[in-house]
Image (cartoon, rainbow, N blue to C red):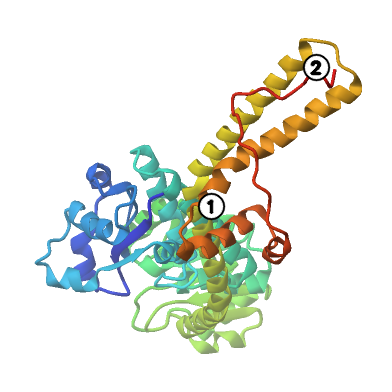
Amino acid sequence: MGEPFVVGISWRTAPVAVRERLAVRDDEIGPVLTRLIADPAIGEAMLVSTCNRVEIYGVARGDADAAAAAARAILLADRATPADAEVAAALYAHAGPGAVGHVFRVASALDSLVLGEAQILGQLKTAYQGAVGRGAAGPILGRCLERAFGVAKRTRTETAIARGSSNVSSVAVELAARVFGDLAGRAVLVVGAGKMSALAARHLRRAGVAELVVTNRSPERAAALAAELDAVARPWDELPSLLAAADVVISSTGARQPILTRAVMHKVARARRYRPLVVVDIAVPRDAEPSITDAEGIYLFDIDDLEKVVAANLAERAKAATDAARIVDGEAAAFEQWRRSQAVVPTIRALRQRFTLVAEQEVQRTLDALARREHTPAQRDQAIRRLGQLLVNKLLHAPQMVLKETPPAQIAARIEAMCAMFELELAAVADEPELAAEPPVDADAPPRVTEESA
């Protein structure tokens, strides 16, 4: 069976200026895969190209060297030349168990820029489906990726590797949920039309909020963001009433002075009859005065609060990474054991076919002999026992001859292997007296049902 390999470049080994030289567009992936599997050394291939990594996962064809296949693969991808020193210095390659372990770590987000992030798993699934669609993924790569997806699920359910938000925008949702418990049915106001506001709003939308309103000093930008978020755009001069109607406020305006002042928010709190209002201020300079929390029911989280939560969550993920890595290592070892076992499948199949053929032939001969005349039960028993002995002799004839003809220097190892295969005790075998020579086996003679036994 071919040996797996991985070759590529990632955020760990190269800056974006180098990574982008290897990047492959979606419409280019198919032709690259076609070139890869057309190579005599490469039997299976899959290509992953994201902002943080460009990697080729493959399987060497037959007995081809996996390391050599990996070197061929990066050239066949037509993204680098041997003279490209920066790319060459950043490339890494893994073969055999090291390649499988790498794939499992990538799927489990142990090799991601943000530890435990979920995006890479979806990217791997898309890449694998593309390889299957092009006929580039075969049984080894298929089994490897199938197990990689299972390993990723295990690490996420059995460890804290993916728990807690890992970016400021999603933490905003996490903090709002701490106040309300459930964000379903809540109203959200987005103040400003910046990128961070949009990201936070998308997370809130996925959390099930009922209403999303956008306001900005520029009506055009408010309308554009509202259309993007499936929200409603409202005029800037309605800000006080919009604040009073919201449950969660995401603010990021770029204003030089606070717009959510203590005076404004005290009026808002009274208008709300002091129902809880979460204000997430992700602007720098800040949009909200820290003193707004003097008003009853106002909960304020600024960018420092969000980043502290992110840091704490990532620290917990880092602790969980040890447990996740243990799962990955165990699964990688199990996969390698499976892969190696596939090498003996043809031999096992041939043995089964050989033994079955011998058994069927001898059983049929005995049945034919018994059918030619009437026999007593004792005579039939004798014929069946003789059949069993004949099968033993016939099936053991070749192994016995191999052992007897083994050179003295190899006999101990061969005996040990034979005992392991047939679950024999070496000591017990050694204590037995020397076996008498067996009579020659006539492979074509039927089981003896004689006149004397009739």
Q: How many marks?
A: 2
As rendered, which of 216 and 121 lies closer to the eye?
Answer: 121
Q: Nearer the viewer, mark 1 or mark 2?
A: 2
Label 2 element class: loop
- Residue at the image position 72 percent from the left and 15 percent from the top: 368
Q: What residue is drawn where x is 12% and y is 64%?
A: 82
Above/below status of 348 relative to 370: below
The 10 Å Cα crowd at callout 2, few under 14, some 14 to 19, many 20 or more, is few
Provide the residue designation for mark 1. 404
At x 28%, y 63%, the residue is 8
* Label 1 – label 2 distance at C-alpha: 37 Å
Residue type pointed to by label 1: Lys
Left or right of 213: which side holds 134? Answer: left
The residue at which mark 2 appears reads as 451
For residue 102, side relative to residue 439 (left or right): left
Q: Nearer the viewer, residue 161 or 211?
A: 161
Between discs 1 and 2, the one toward the N terminus: 1
Provide residue 306's location: percent of width, then percent of height. 50, 80
SS state under label 1: helix
Q: Residue 110, how many percent across, how many down?
A: 46, 71
Provide residue 13's location: percent of width, then percent of height.
28, 74
